[in-house]
Image (spheres, grey):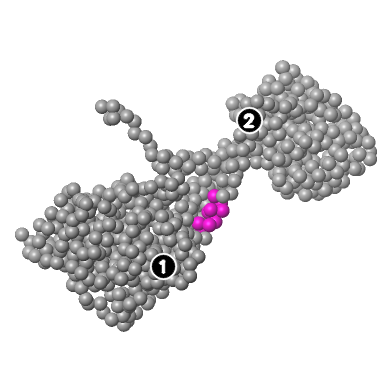
């Protein structure tokens, strides 16, 4: 009872991919927020009446103090100019502004936004270190007169958090976005100034607006920024939000000119002879600020990596499709030309090995399909310790040329090696216990052995149970990916895998490399790479069709692809020395292994970035170009898929589900591959996972539903 009530723990290798995806989405959301792509409000309040604004504020100075219910204003003394810069810091223009200020020994006030301060904390520190003052300009730059009090609090606190994280200080200065002079205060902006005062901030507007954002020219910027008749003033400029070359040039001219006229350029509290607006932050608040800035930096870096990854996957997708389309056409033209032959016809008998573990639902159909073969064969079913009567079913059929070899459960590689040891013939065909062959499959599969250089042949594996959506998706994958890939790899002479469902080997090639190995979970990939390295040719026989039962549930598909992905990684690692070797092994190592690593491991891992940026673009923009780019990729895939279906003489109907496959199926394969990576990096050892079969592939397409495959009459 206790064991039943015990909670099932989520395996670490399942939990880690989920946590990784959650963290990735969180980083992207943070990046969108910090770049004002999410939760930003760009509305601007239209001017309204000002009858509720105190007269002394409308006619007062640019420094408005509403703390403690007051409504006081201050003016900057004569011959003092407070330069203020809004919307920064900017990585291009803020350093240039700071350089000019330092050159002319002038101070200023920088009203920074939280988004920019979070992204460029070094510039905030430099501003403070060089004696300038920092002020709040909200986090996302919304018009606060259109916001709720909660949103105002959020804008202030996040802005302050970013400044604290960057420079370790708090500031009491605040400038509302879209603000102007004190006389422009109205019934919409005045309540905001009052609320800001309740939060302990002093509102700072301006007396002179340079309008540098309009780029009116250096002379005009200087004219608008210069106080008249020796008066003091607060000048509004910008160090971010666009190209600020005119601002920098105007500043470099204006500072010495006004200094010669007796003006001083101070920060605000210096000009007002008031205590500094800055106060140091320590303890938990400081570390919260540092943590915030750190996370923002990580989110920007993650996004930069993802963008680079998107560029890589874009190149790999186009390169792979290009290679597949061109080289598969070359392969098809070669093997389909009139009179083509691999060599002398292969007519001698061959051995077909059927390793079987608990295949009671499928084994009869498998064996009967072999008996109907038009090529002379012996059939050996190796029962690998089945507990469901698989061996008894085969024996009870009493079919000619069929032998059953029993062994204790030792795994598929051991079963195949046992079959090879019992085989009478020099050409050995291997298939899975859930697969059926067409009558011509064996004959077509062994013809390439007419070339004595051929050591192994890959057949054309097809999905037999493609009537359901998940089966249709795998059907697209088999036709488009696996078979086009094999044509490409055949031409490049670096076939990475002989499929377990339909493959043939020369006995001499198997013996030279030591037979099937259990070093990896992808014994078919392992043996194929070993045969390549031994100097044999490995080719693809397109007409050797086999119909296999594909997984019909997500869980079963997950298990199968997890094993395939992890096994492929194991095989690549096992044969890694081929990269530095000479001869056939070196050729495969420097051509085959990189292609397999790029197209079968790296590309599937990065492929979901296309969908990630689709979602990101739909939410944050730009929507139009994002959708266009995604459909361009989909069109490329559809064209490649249609061509592959044409080559394999398949109906195009399943391709109607291609868009949905790209959205859902690819994400599943991504998580599977990510889990495989984690298993590999954490040193895990994945066990063989038996798939549950339903016996859904009774006969190859075209076989009579009323006639058994052995030709015996229906009872």
Of residues 556 and 590, the one nearer the viewer is 590
Instruction: For marks 1 and 2, give the CA distance.
Output: 57 Å
In this view, the residue farthest toward the bottom is: 339
Q: Give the range drawn in magenta.
A: 306-314
Asked which secondary structure carries label 2, the reply is: helix
Horizontal and vertical percent position of residue 705: 15, 61
- Image quadrant in which the C terminus is located: bottom left
The residue under the point 80% across, 46% down is 248
- Label number found at residue 287: 2
- Label number found at residue 155: none
Of residues 3 and 159, the one nearer the viewer is 3
In the image, taking residue 357 as reference, residue 27 lies left or right, namely right
The residue under the point 33% across, 51% down is 560
From the viewer's perspective, is the residue at label 1 or at label 2 nearer? 1
Horizontal and vertical percent position of residue 325: 43, 68
- Label number found at residue 533: 1
Vertical arrangement, residue 627 with respect to residue 452, above or below: above
Does the rendering let one see residue 231?
no
Horizontal and vertical percent position of residue 198: 68, 20
Quadrant assignment, res 704: bottom left
Horizontal and vertical percent position of residue 587: 46, 69
Count the marks: how many?
2
Q: Which of marks 1 and 2 is nearer the N terminus?
A: 2
In the image, taking residue 215 as reference, residue 330 lies left or right, namely left
Does the rendering let one see residue 523?
yes
Of residues 348 and 667, the one nearer the viewer is 348
The residue under the point 68% across, 24% down is 196
Vertical arrangement, residue 72 with respect to residue 451, above or below: above
Asked which secondary structure carries label 1, the reply is: helix
């Amino acid at each position: 009872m206790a064991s039943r009530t015990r909670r099932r723990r989520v395996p670490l290798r399942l939990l880690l991919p989920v946590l990784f995806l959650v963290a990735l989405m969180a980083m992207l959301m943070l990046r969108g927020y910090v770049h004002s792509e999410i939760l930003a409000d760009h509305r601007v309040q239209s001017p309204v009446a000002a009858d509720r604004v105190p007269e002394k504020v409308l006619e007062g100075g640019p420094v408005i103090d509403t703390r403690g219910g007051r409504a006081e204003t201050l003016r900057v003394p004569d011959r003092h100019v407070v330069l203020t810069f809004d919307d920064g810091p900017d990585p291009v223009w803020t350093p240039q502004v700071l350089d000019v200020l330092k050159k002319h020994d002038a101070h200023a006030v920088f009203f920074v936004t939280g988004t920019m301060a979070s992204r460029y904390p070094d510039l905030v520190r430099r501003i403070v270190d060089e004696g300038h003052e920092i002020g709040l300009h909200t986090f996302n730059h919304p018009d606060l007169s259109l916001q709720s009090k909660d949103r105002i609090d959020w804008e202030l606190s996040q802005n302050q958090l970013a400044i604290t994280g960057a420079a370790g200080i708090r500031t009491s200065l605040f400038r509302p976005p879209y603000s102007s002079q004190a006389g422009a205060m109205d019934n919409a902006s005045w309540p905001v100034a009052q609320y800001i005062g309740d939060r302990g901030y002093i509102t700072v507007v301006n007396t002179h607006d340079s309008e540098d954002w309009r780029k009116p020219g250096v002379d005009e910027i200087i004219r608008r920024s210069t106080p008249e008749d020796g008066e003091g003033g607060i000048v509004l400029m910008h160090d971010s939000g666009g190209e600020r070359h005119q601002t920098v040039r105007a500043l470099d001219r204006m500072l010495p000119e006004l200094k010669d006229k007796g003006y001083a350029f101070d920060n605000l509290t210096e000009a007002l002879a008031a205590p500094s607006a800055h106060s140091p932050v320590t303890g938990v608040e400081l570390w919260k600020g540092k943590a915030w800035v750190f996370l923002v930096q990580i989110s920007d870096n993650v996004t930069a990596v993802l963008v680079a990854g998107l560029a890589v996957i874009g190149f790999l997708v186009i390169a792979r499709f290009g290679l597949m389309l061109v080289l598969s056409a070359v392969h098809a033209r070669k093997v389909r030309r009139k009179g083509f032959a691999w060599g002398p016809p292969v007519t001698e008998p061959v051995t077909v090995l059927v390793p079987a573990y608990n295949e009671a639902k499928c084994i009869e159909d498998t064996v009967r399909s072999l008996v109907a073969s038009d090529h002379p064969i012996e059939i050996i079913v190796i029962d690998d310790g089945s507990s469901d009567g698989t061996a008894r079913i085969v024996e009870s059929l009493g079919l000619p040329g069929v032998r059953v070899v029993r062994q204790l459960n030792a795994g598929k590689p051991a079963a195949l090696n046992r079959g090879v040891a019992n085989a009478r013939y020099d050409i050995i065909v291997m298939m899975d216990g859930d697969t059926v062959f067409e009558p011509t499959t064996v004959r077509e599969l062994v013809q390439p052995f007419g070339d004595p250089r051929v050591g192994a042949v890959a057949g054309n594996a097809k999905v037999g149970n493609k009537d359901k959506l998940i089966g249709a998706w795998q059907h697209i994958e088999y036709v488009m990916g696996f078979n086009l890939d094999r044509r490409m790899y055949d031409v490049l002479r670096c076939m990475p895998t002989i499929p377990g469902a339909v493959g043939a080997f020369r006995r001499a090639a198997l013996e030279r490399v030591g037979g099937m190995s259990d070093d990896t979970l992808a014994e078919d990939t392992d043996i194929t790479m070993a045969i390549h390295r031994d100097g044999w040719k490995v080719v693809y026989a397109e007409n050797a069709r086999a119909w296999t039962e594909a997984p019909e549930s997500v869980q079963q598909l997950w298990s199968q692809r997890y094993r395939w992905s992890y096994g492929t990684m194991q095989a690549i690692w096992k044969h890694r020395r081929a990269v530095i070797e000479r001869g056939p092994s070196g050729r495969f190592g420097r051509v085959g292994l990189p292609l397999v690593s790029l197209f079968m491991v790296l590309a599937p891992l990065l492929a979901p970035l296309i969908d990630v940026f689709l979602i990101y673009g739909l939410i944050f923009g730009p929507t139009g170009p994002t959708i266009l780019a995604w459909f361009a990729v989909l069109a490329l895939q559809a064209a490649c898929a249609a061509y592959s279906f044409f080559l394999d003489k398949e109906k195009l109907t399943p391709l109607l589900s291609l868009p949905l496959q790209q959205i859902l199926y690819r994400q599943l394969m991504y998580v599977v591959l990510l889990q495989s990576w984690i298993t590999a990096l954490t040193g895990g050892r994945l066990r063989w996972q038996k798939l549950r079969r339903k016996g859904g592939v009774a006969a190859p397409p075209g076989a009579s539903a009323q006639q058994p495959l052995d030709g015996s009459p229906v009872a």
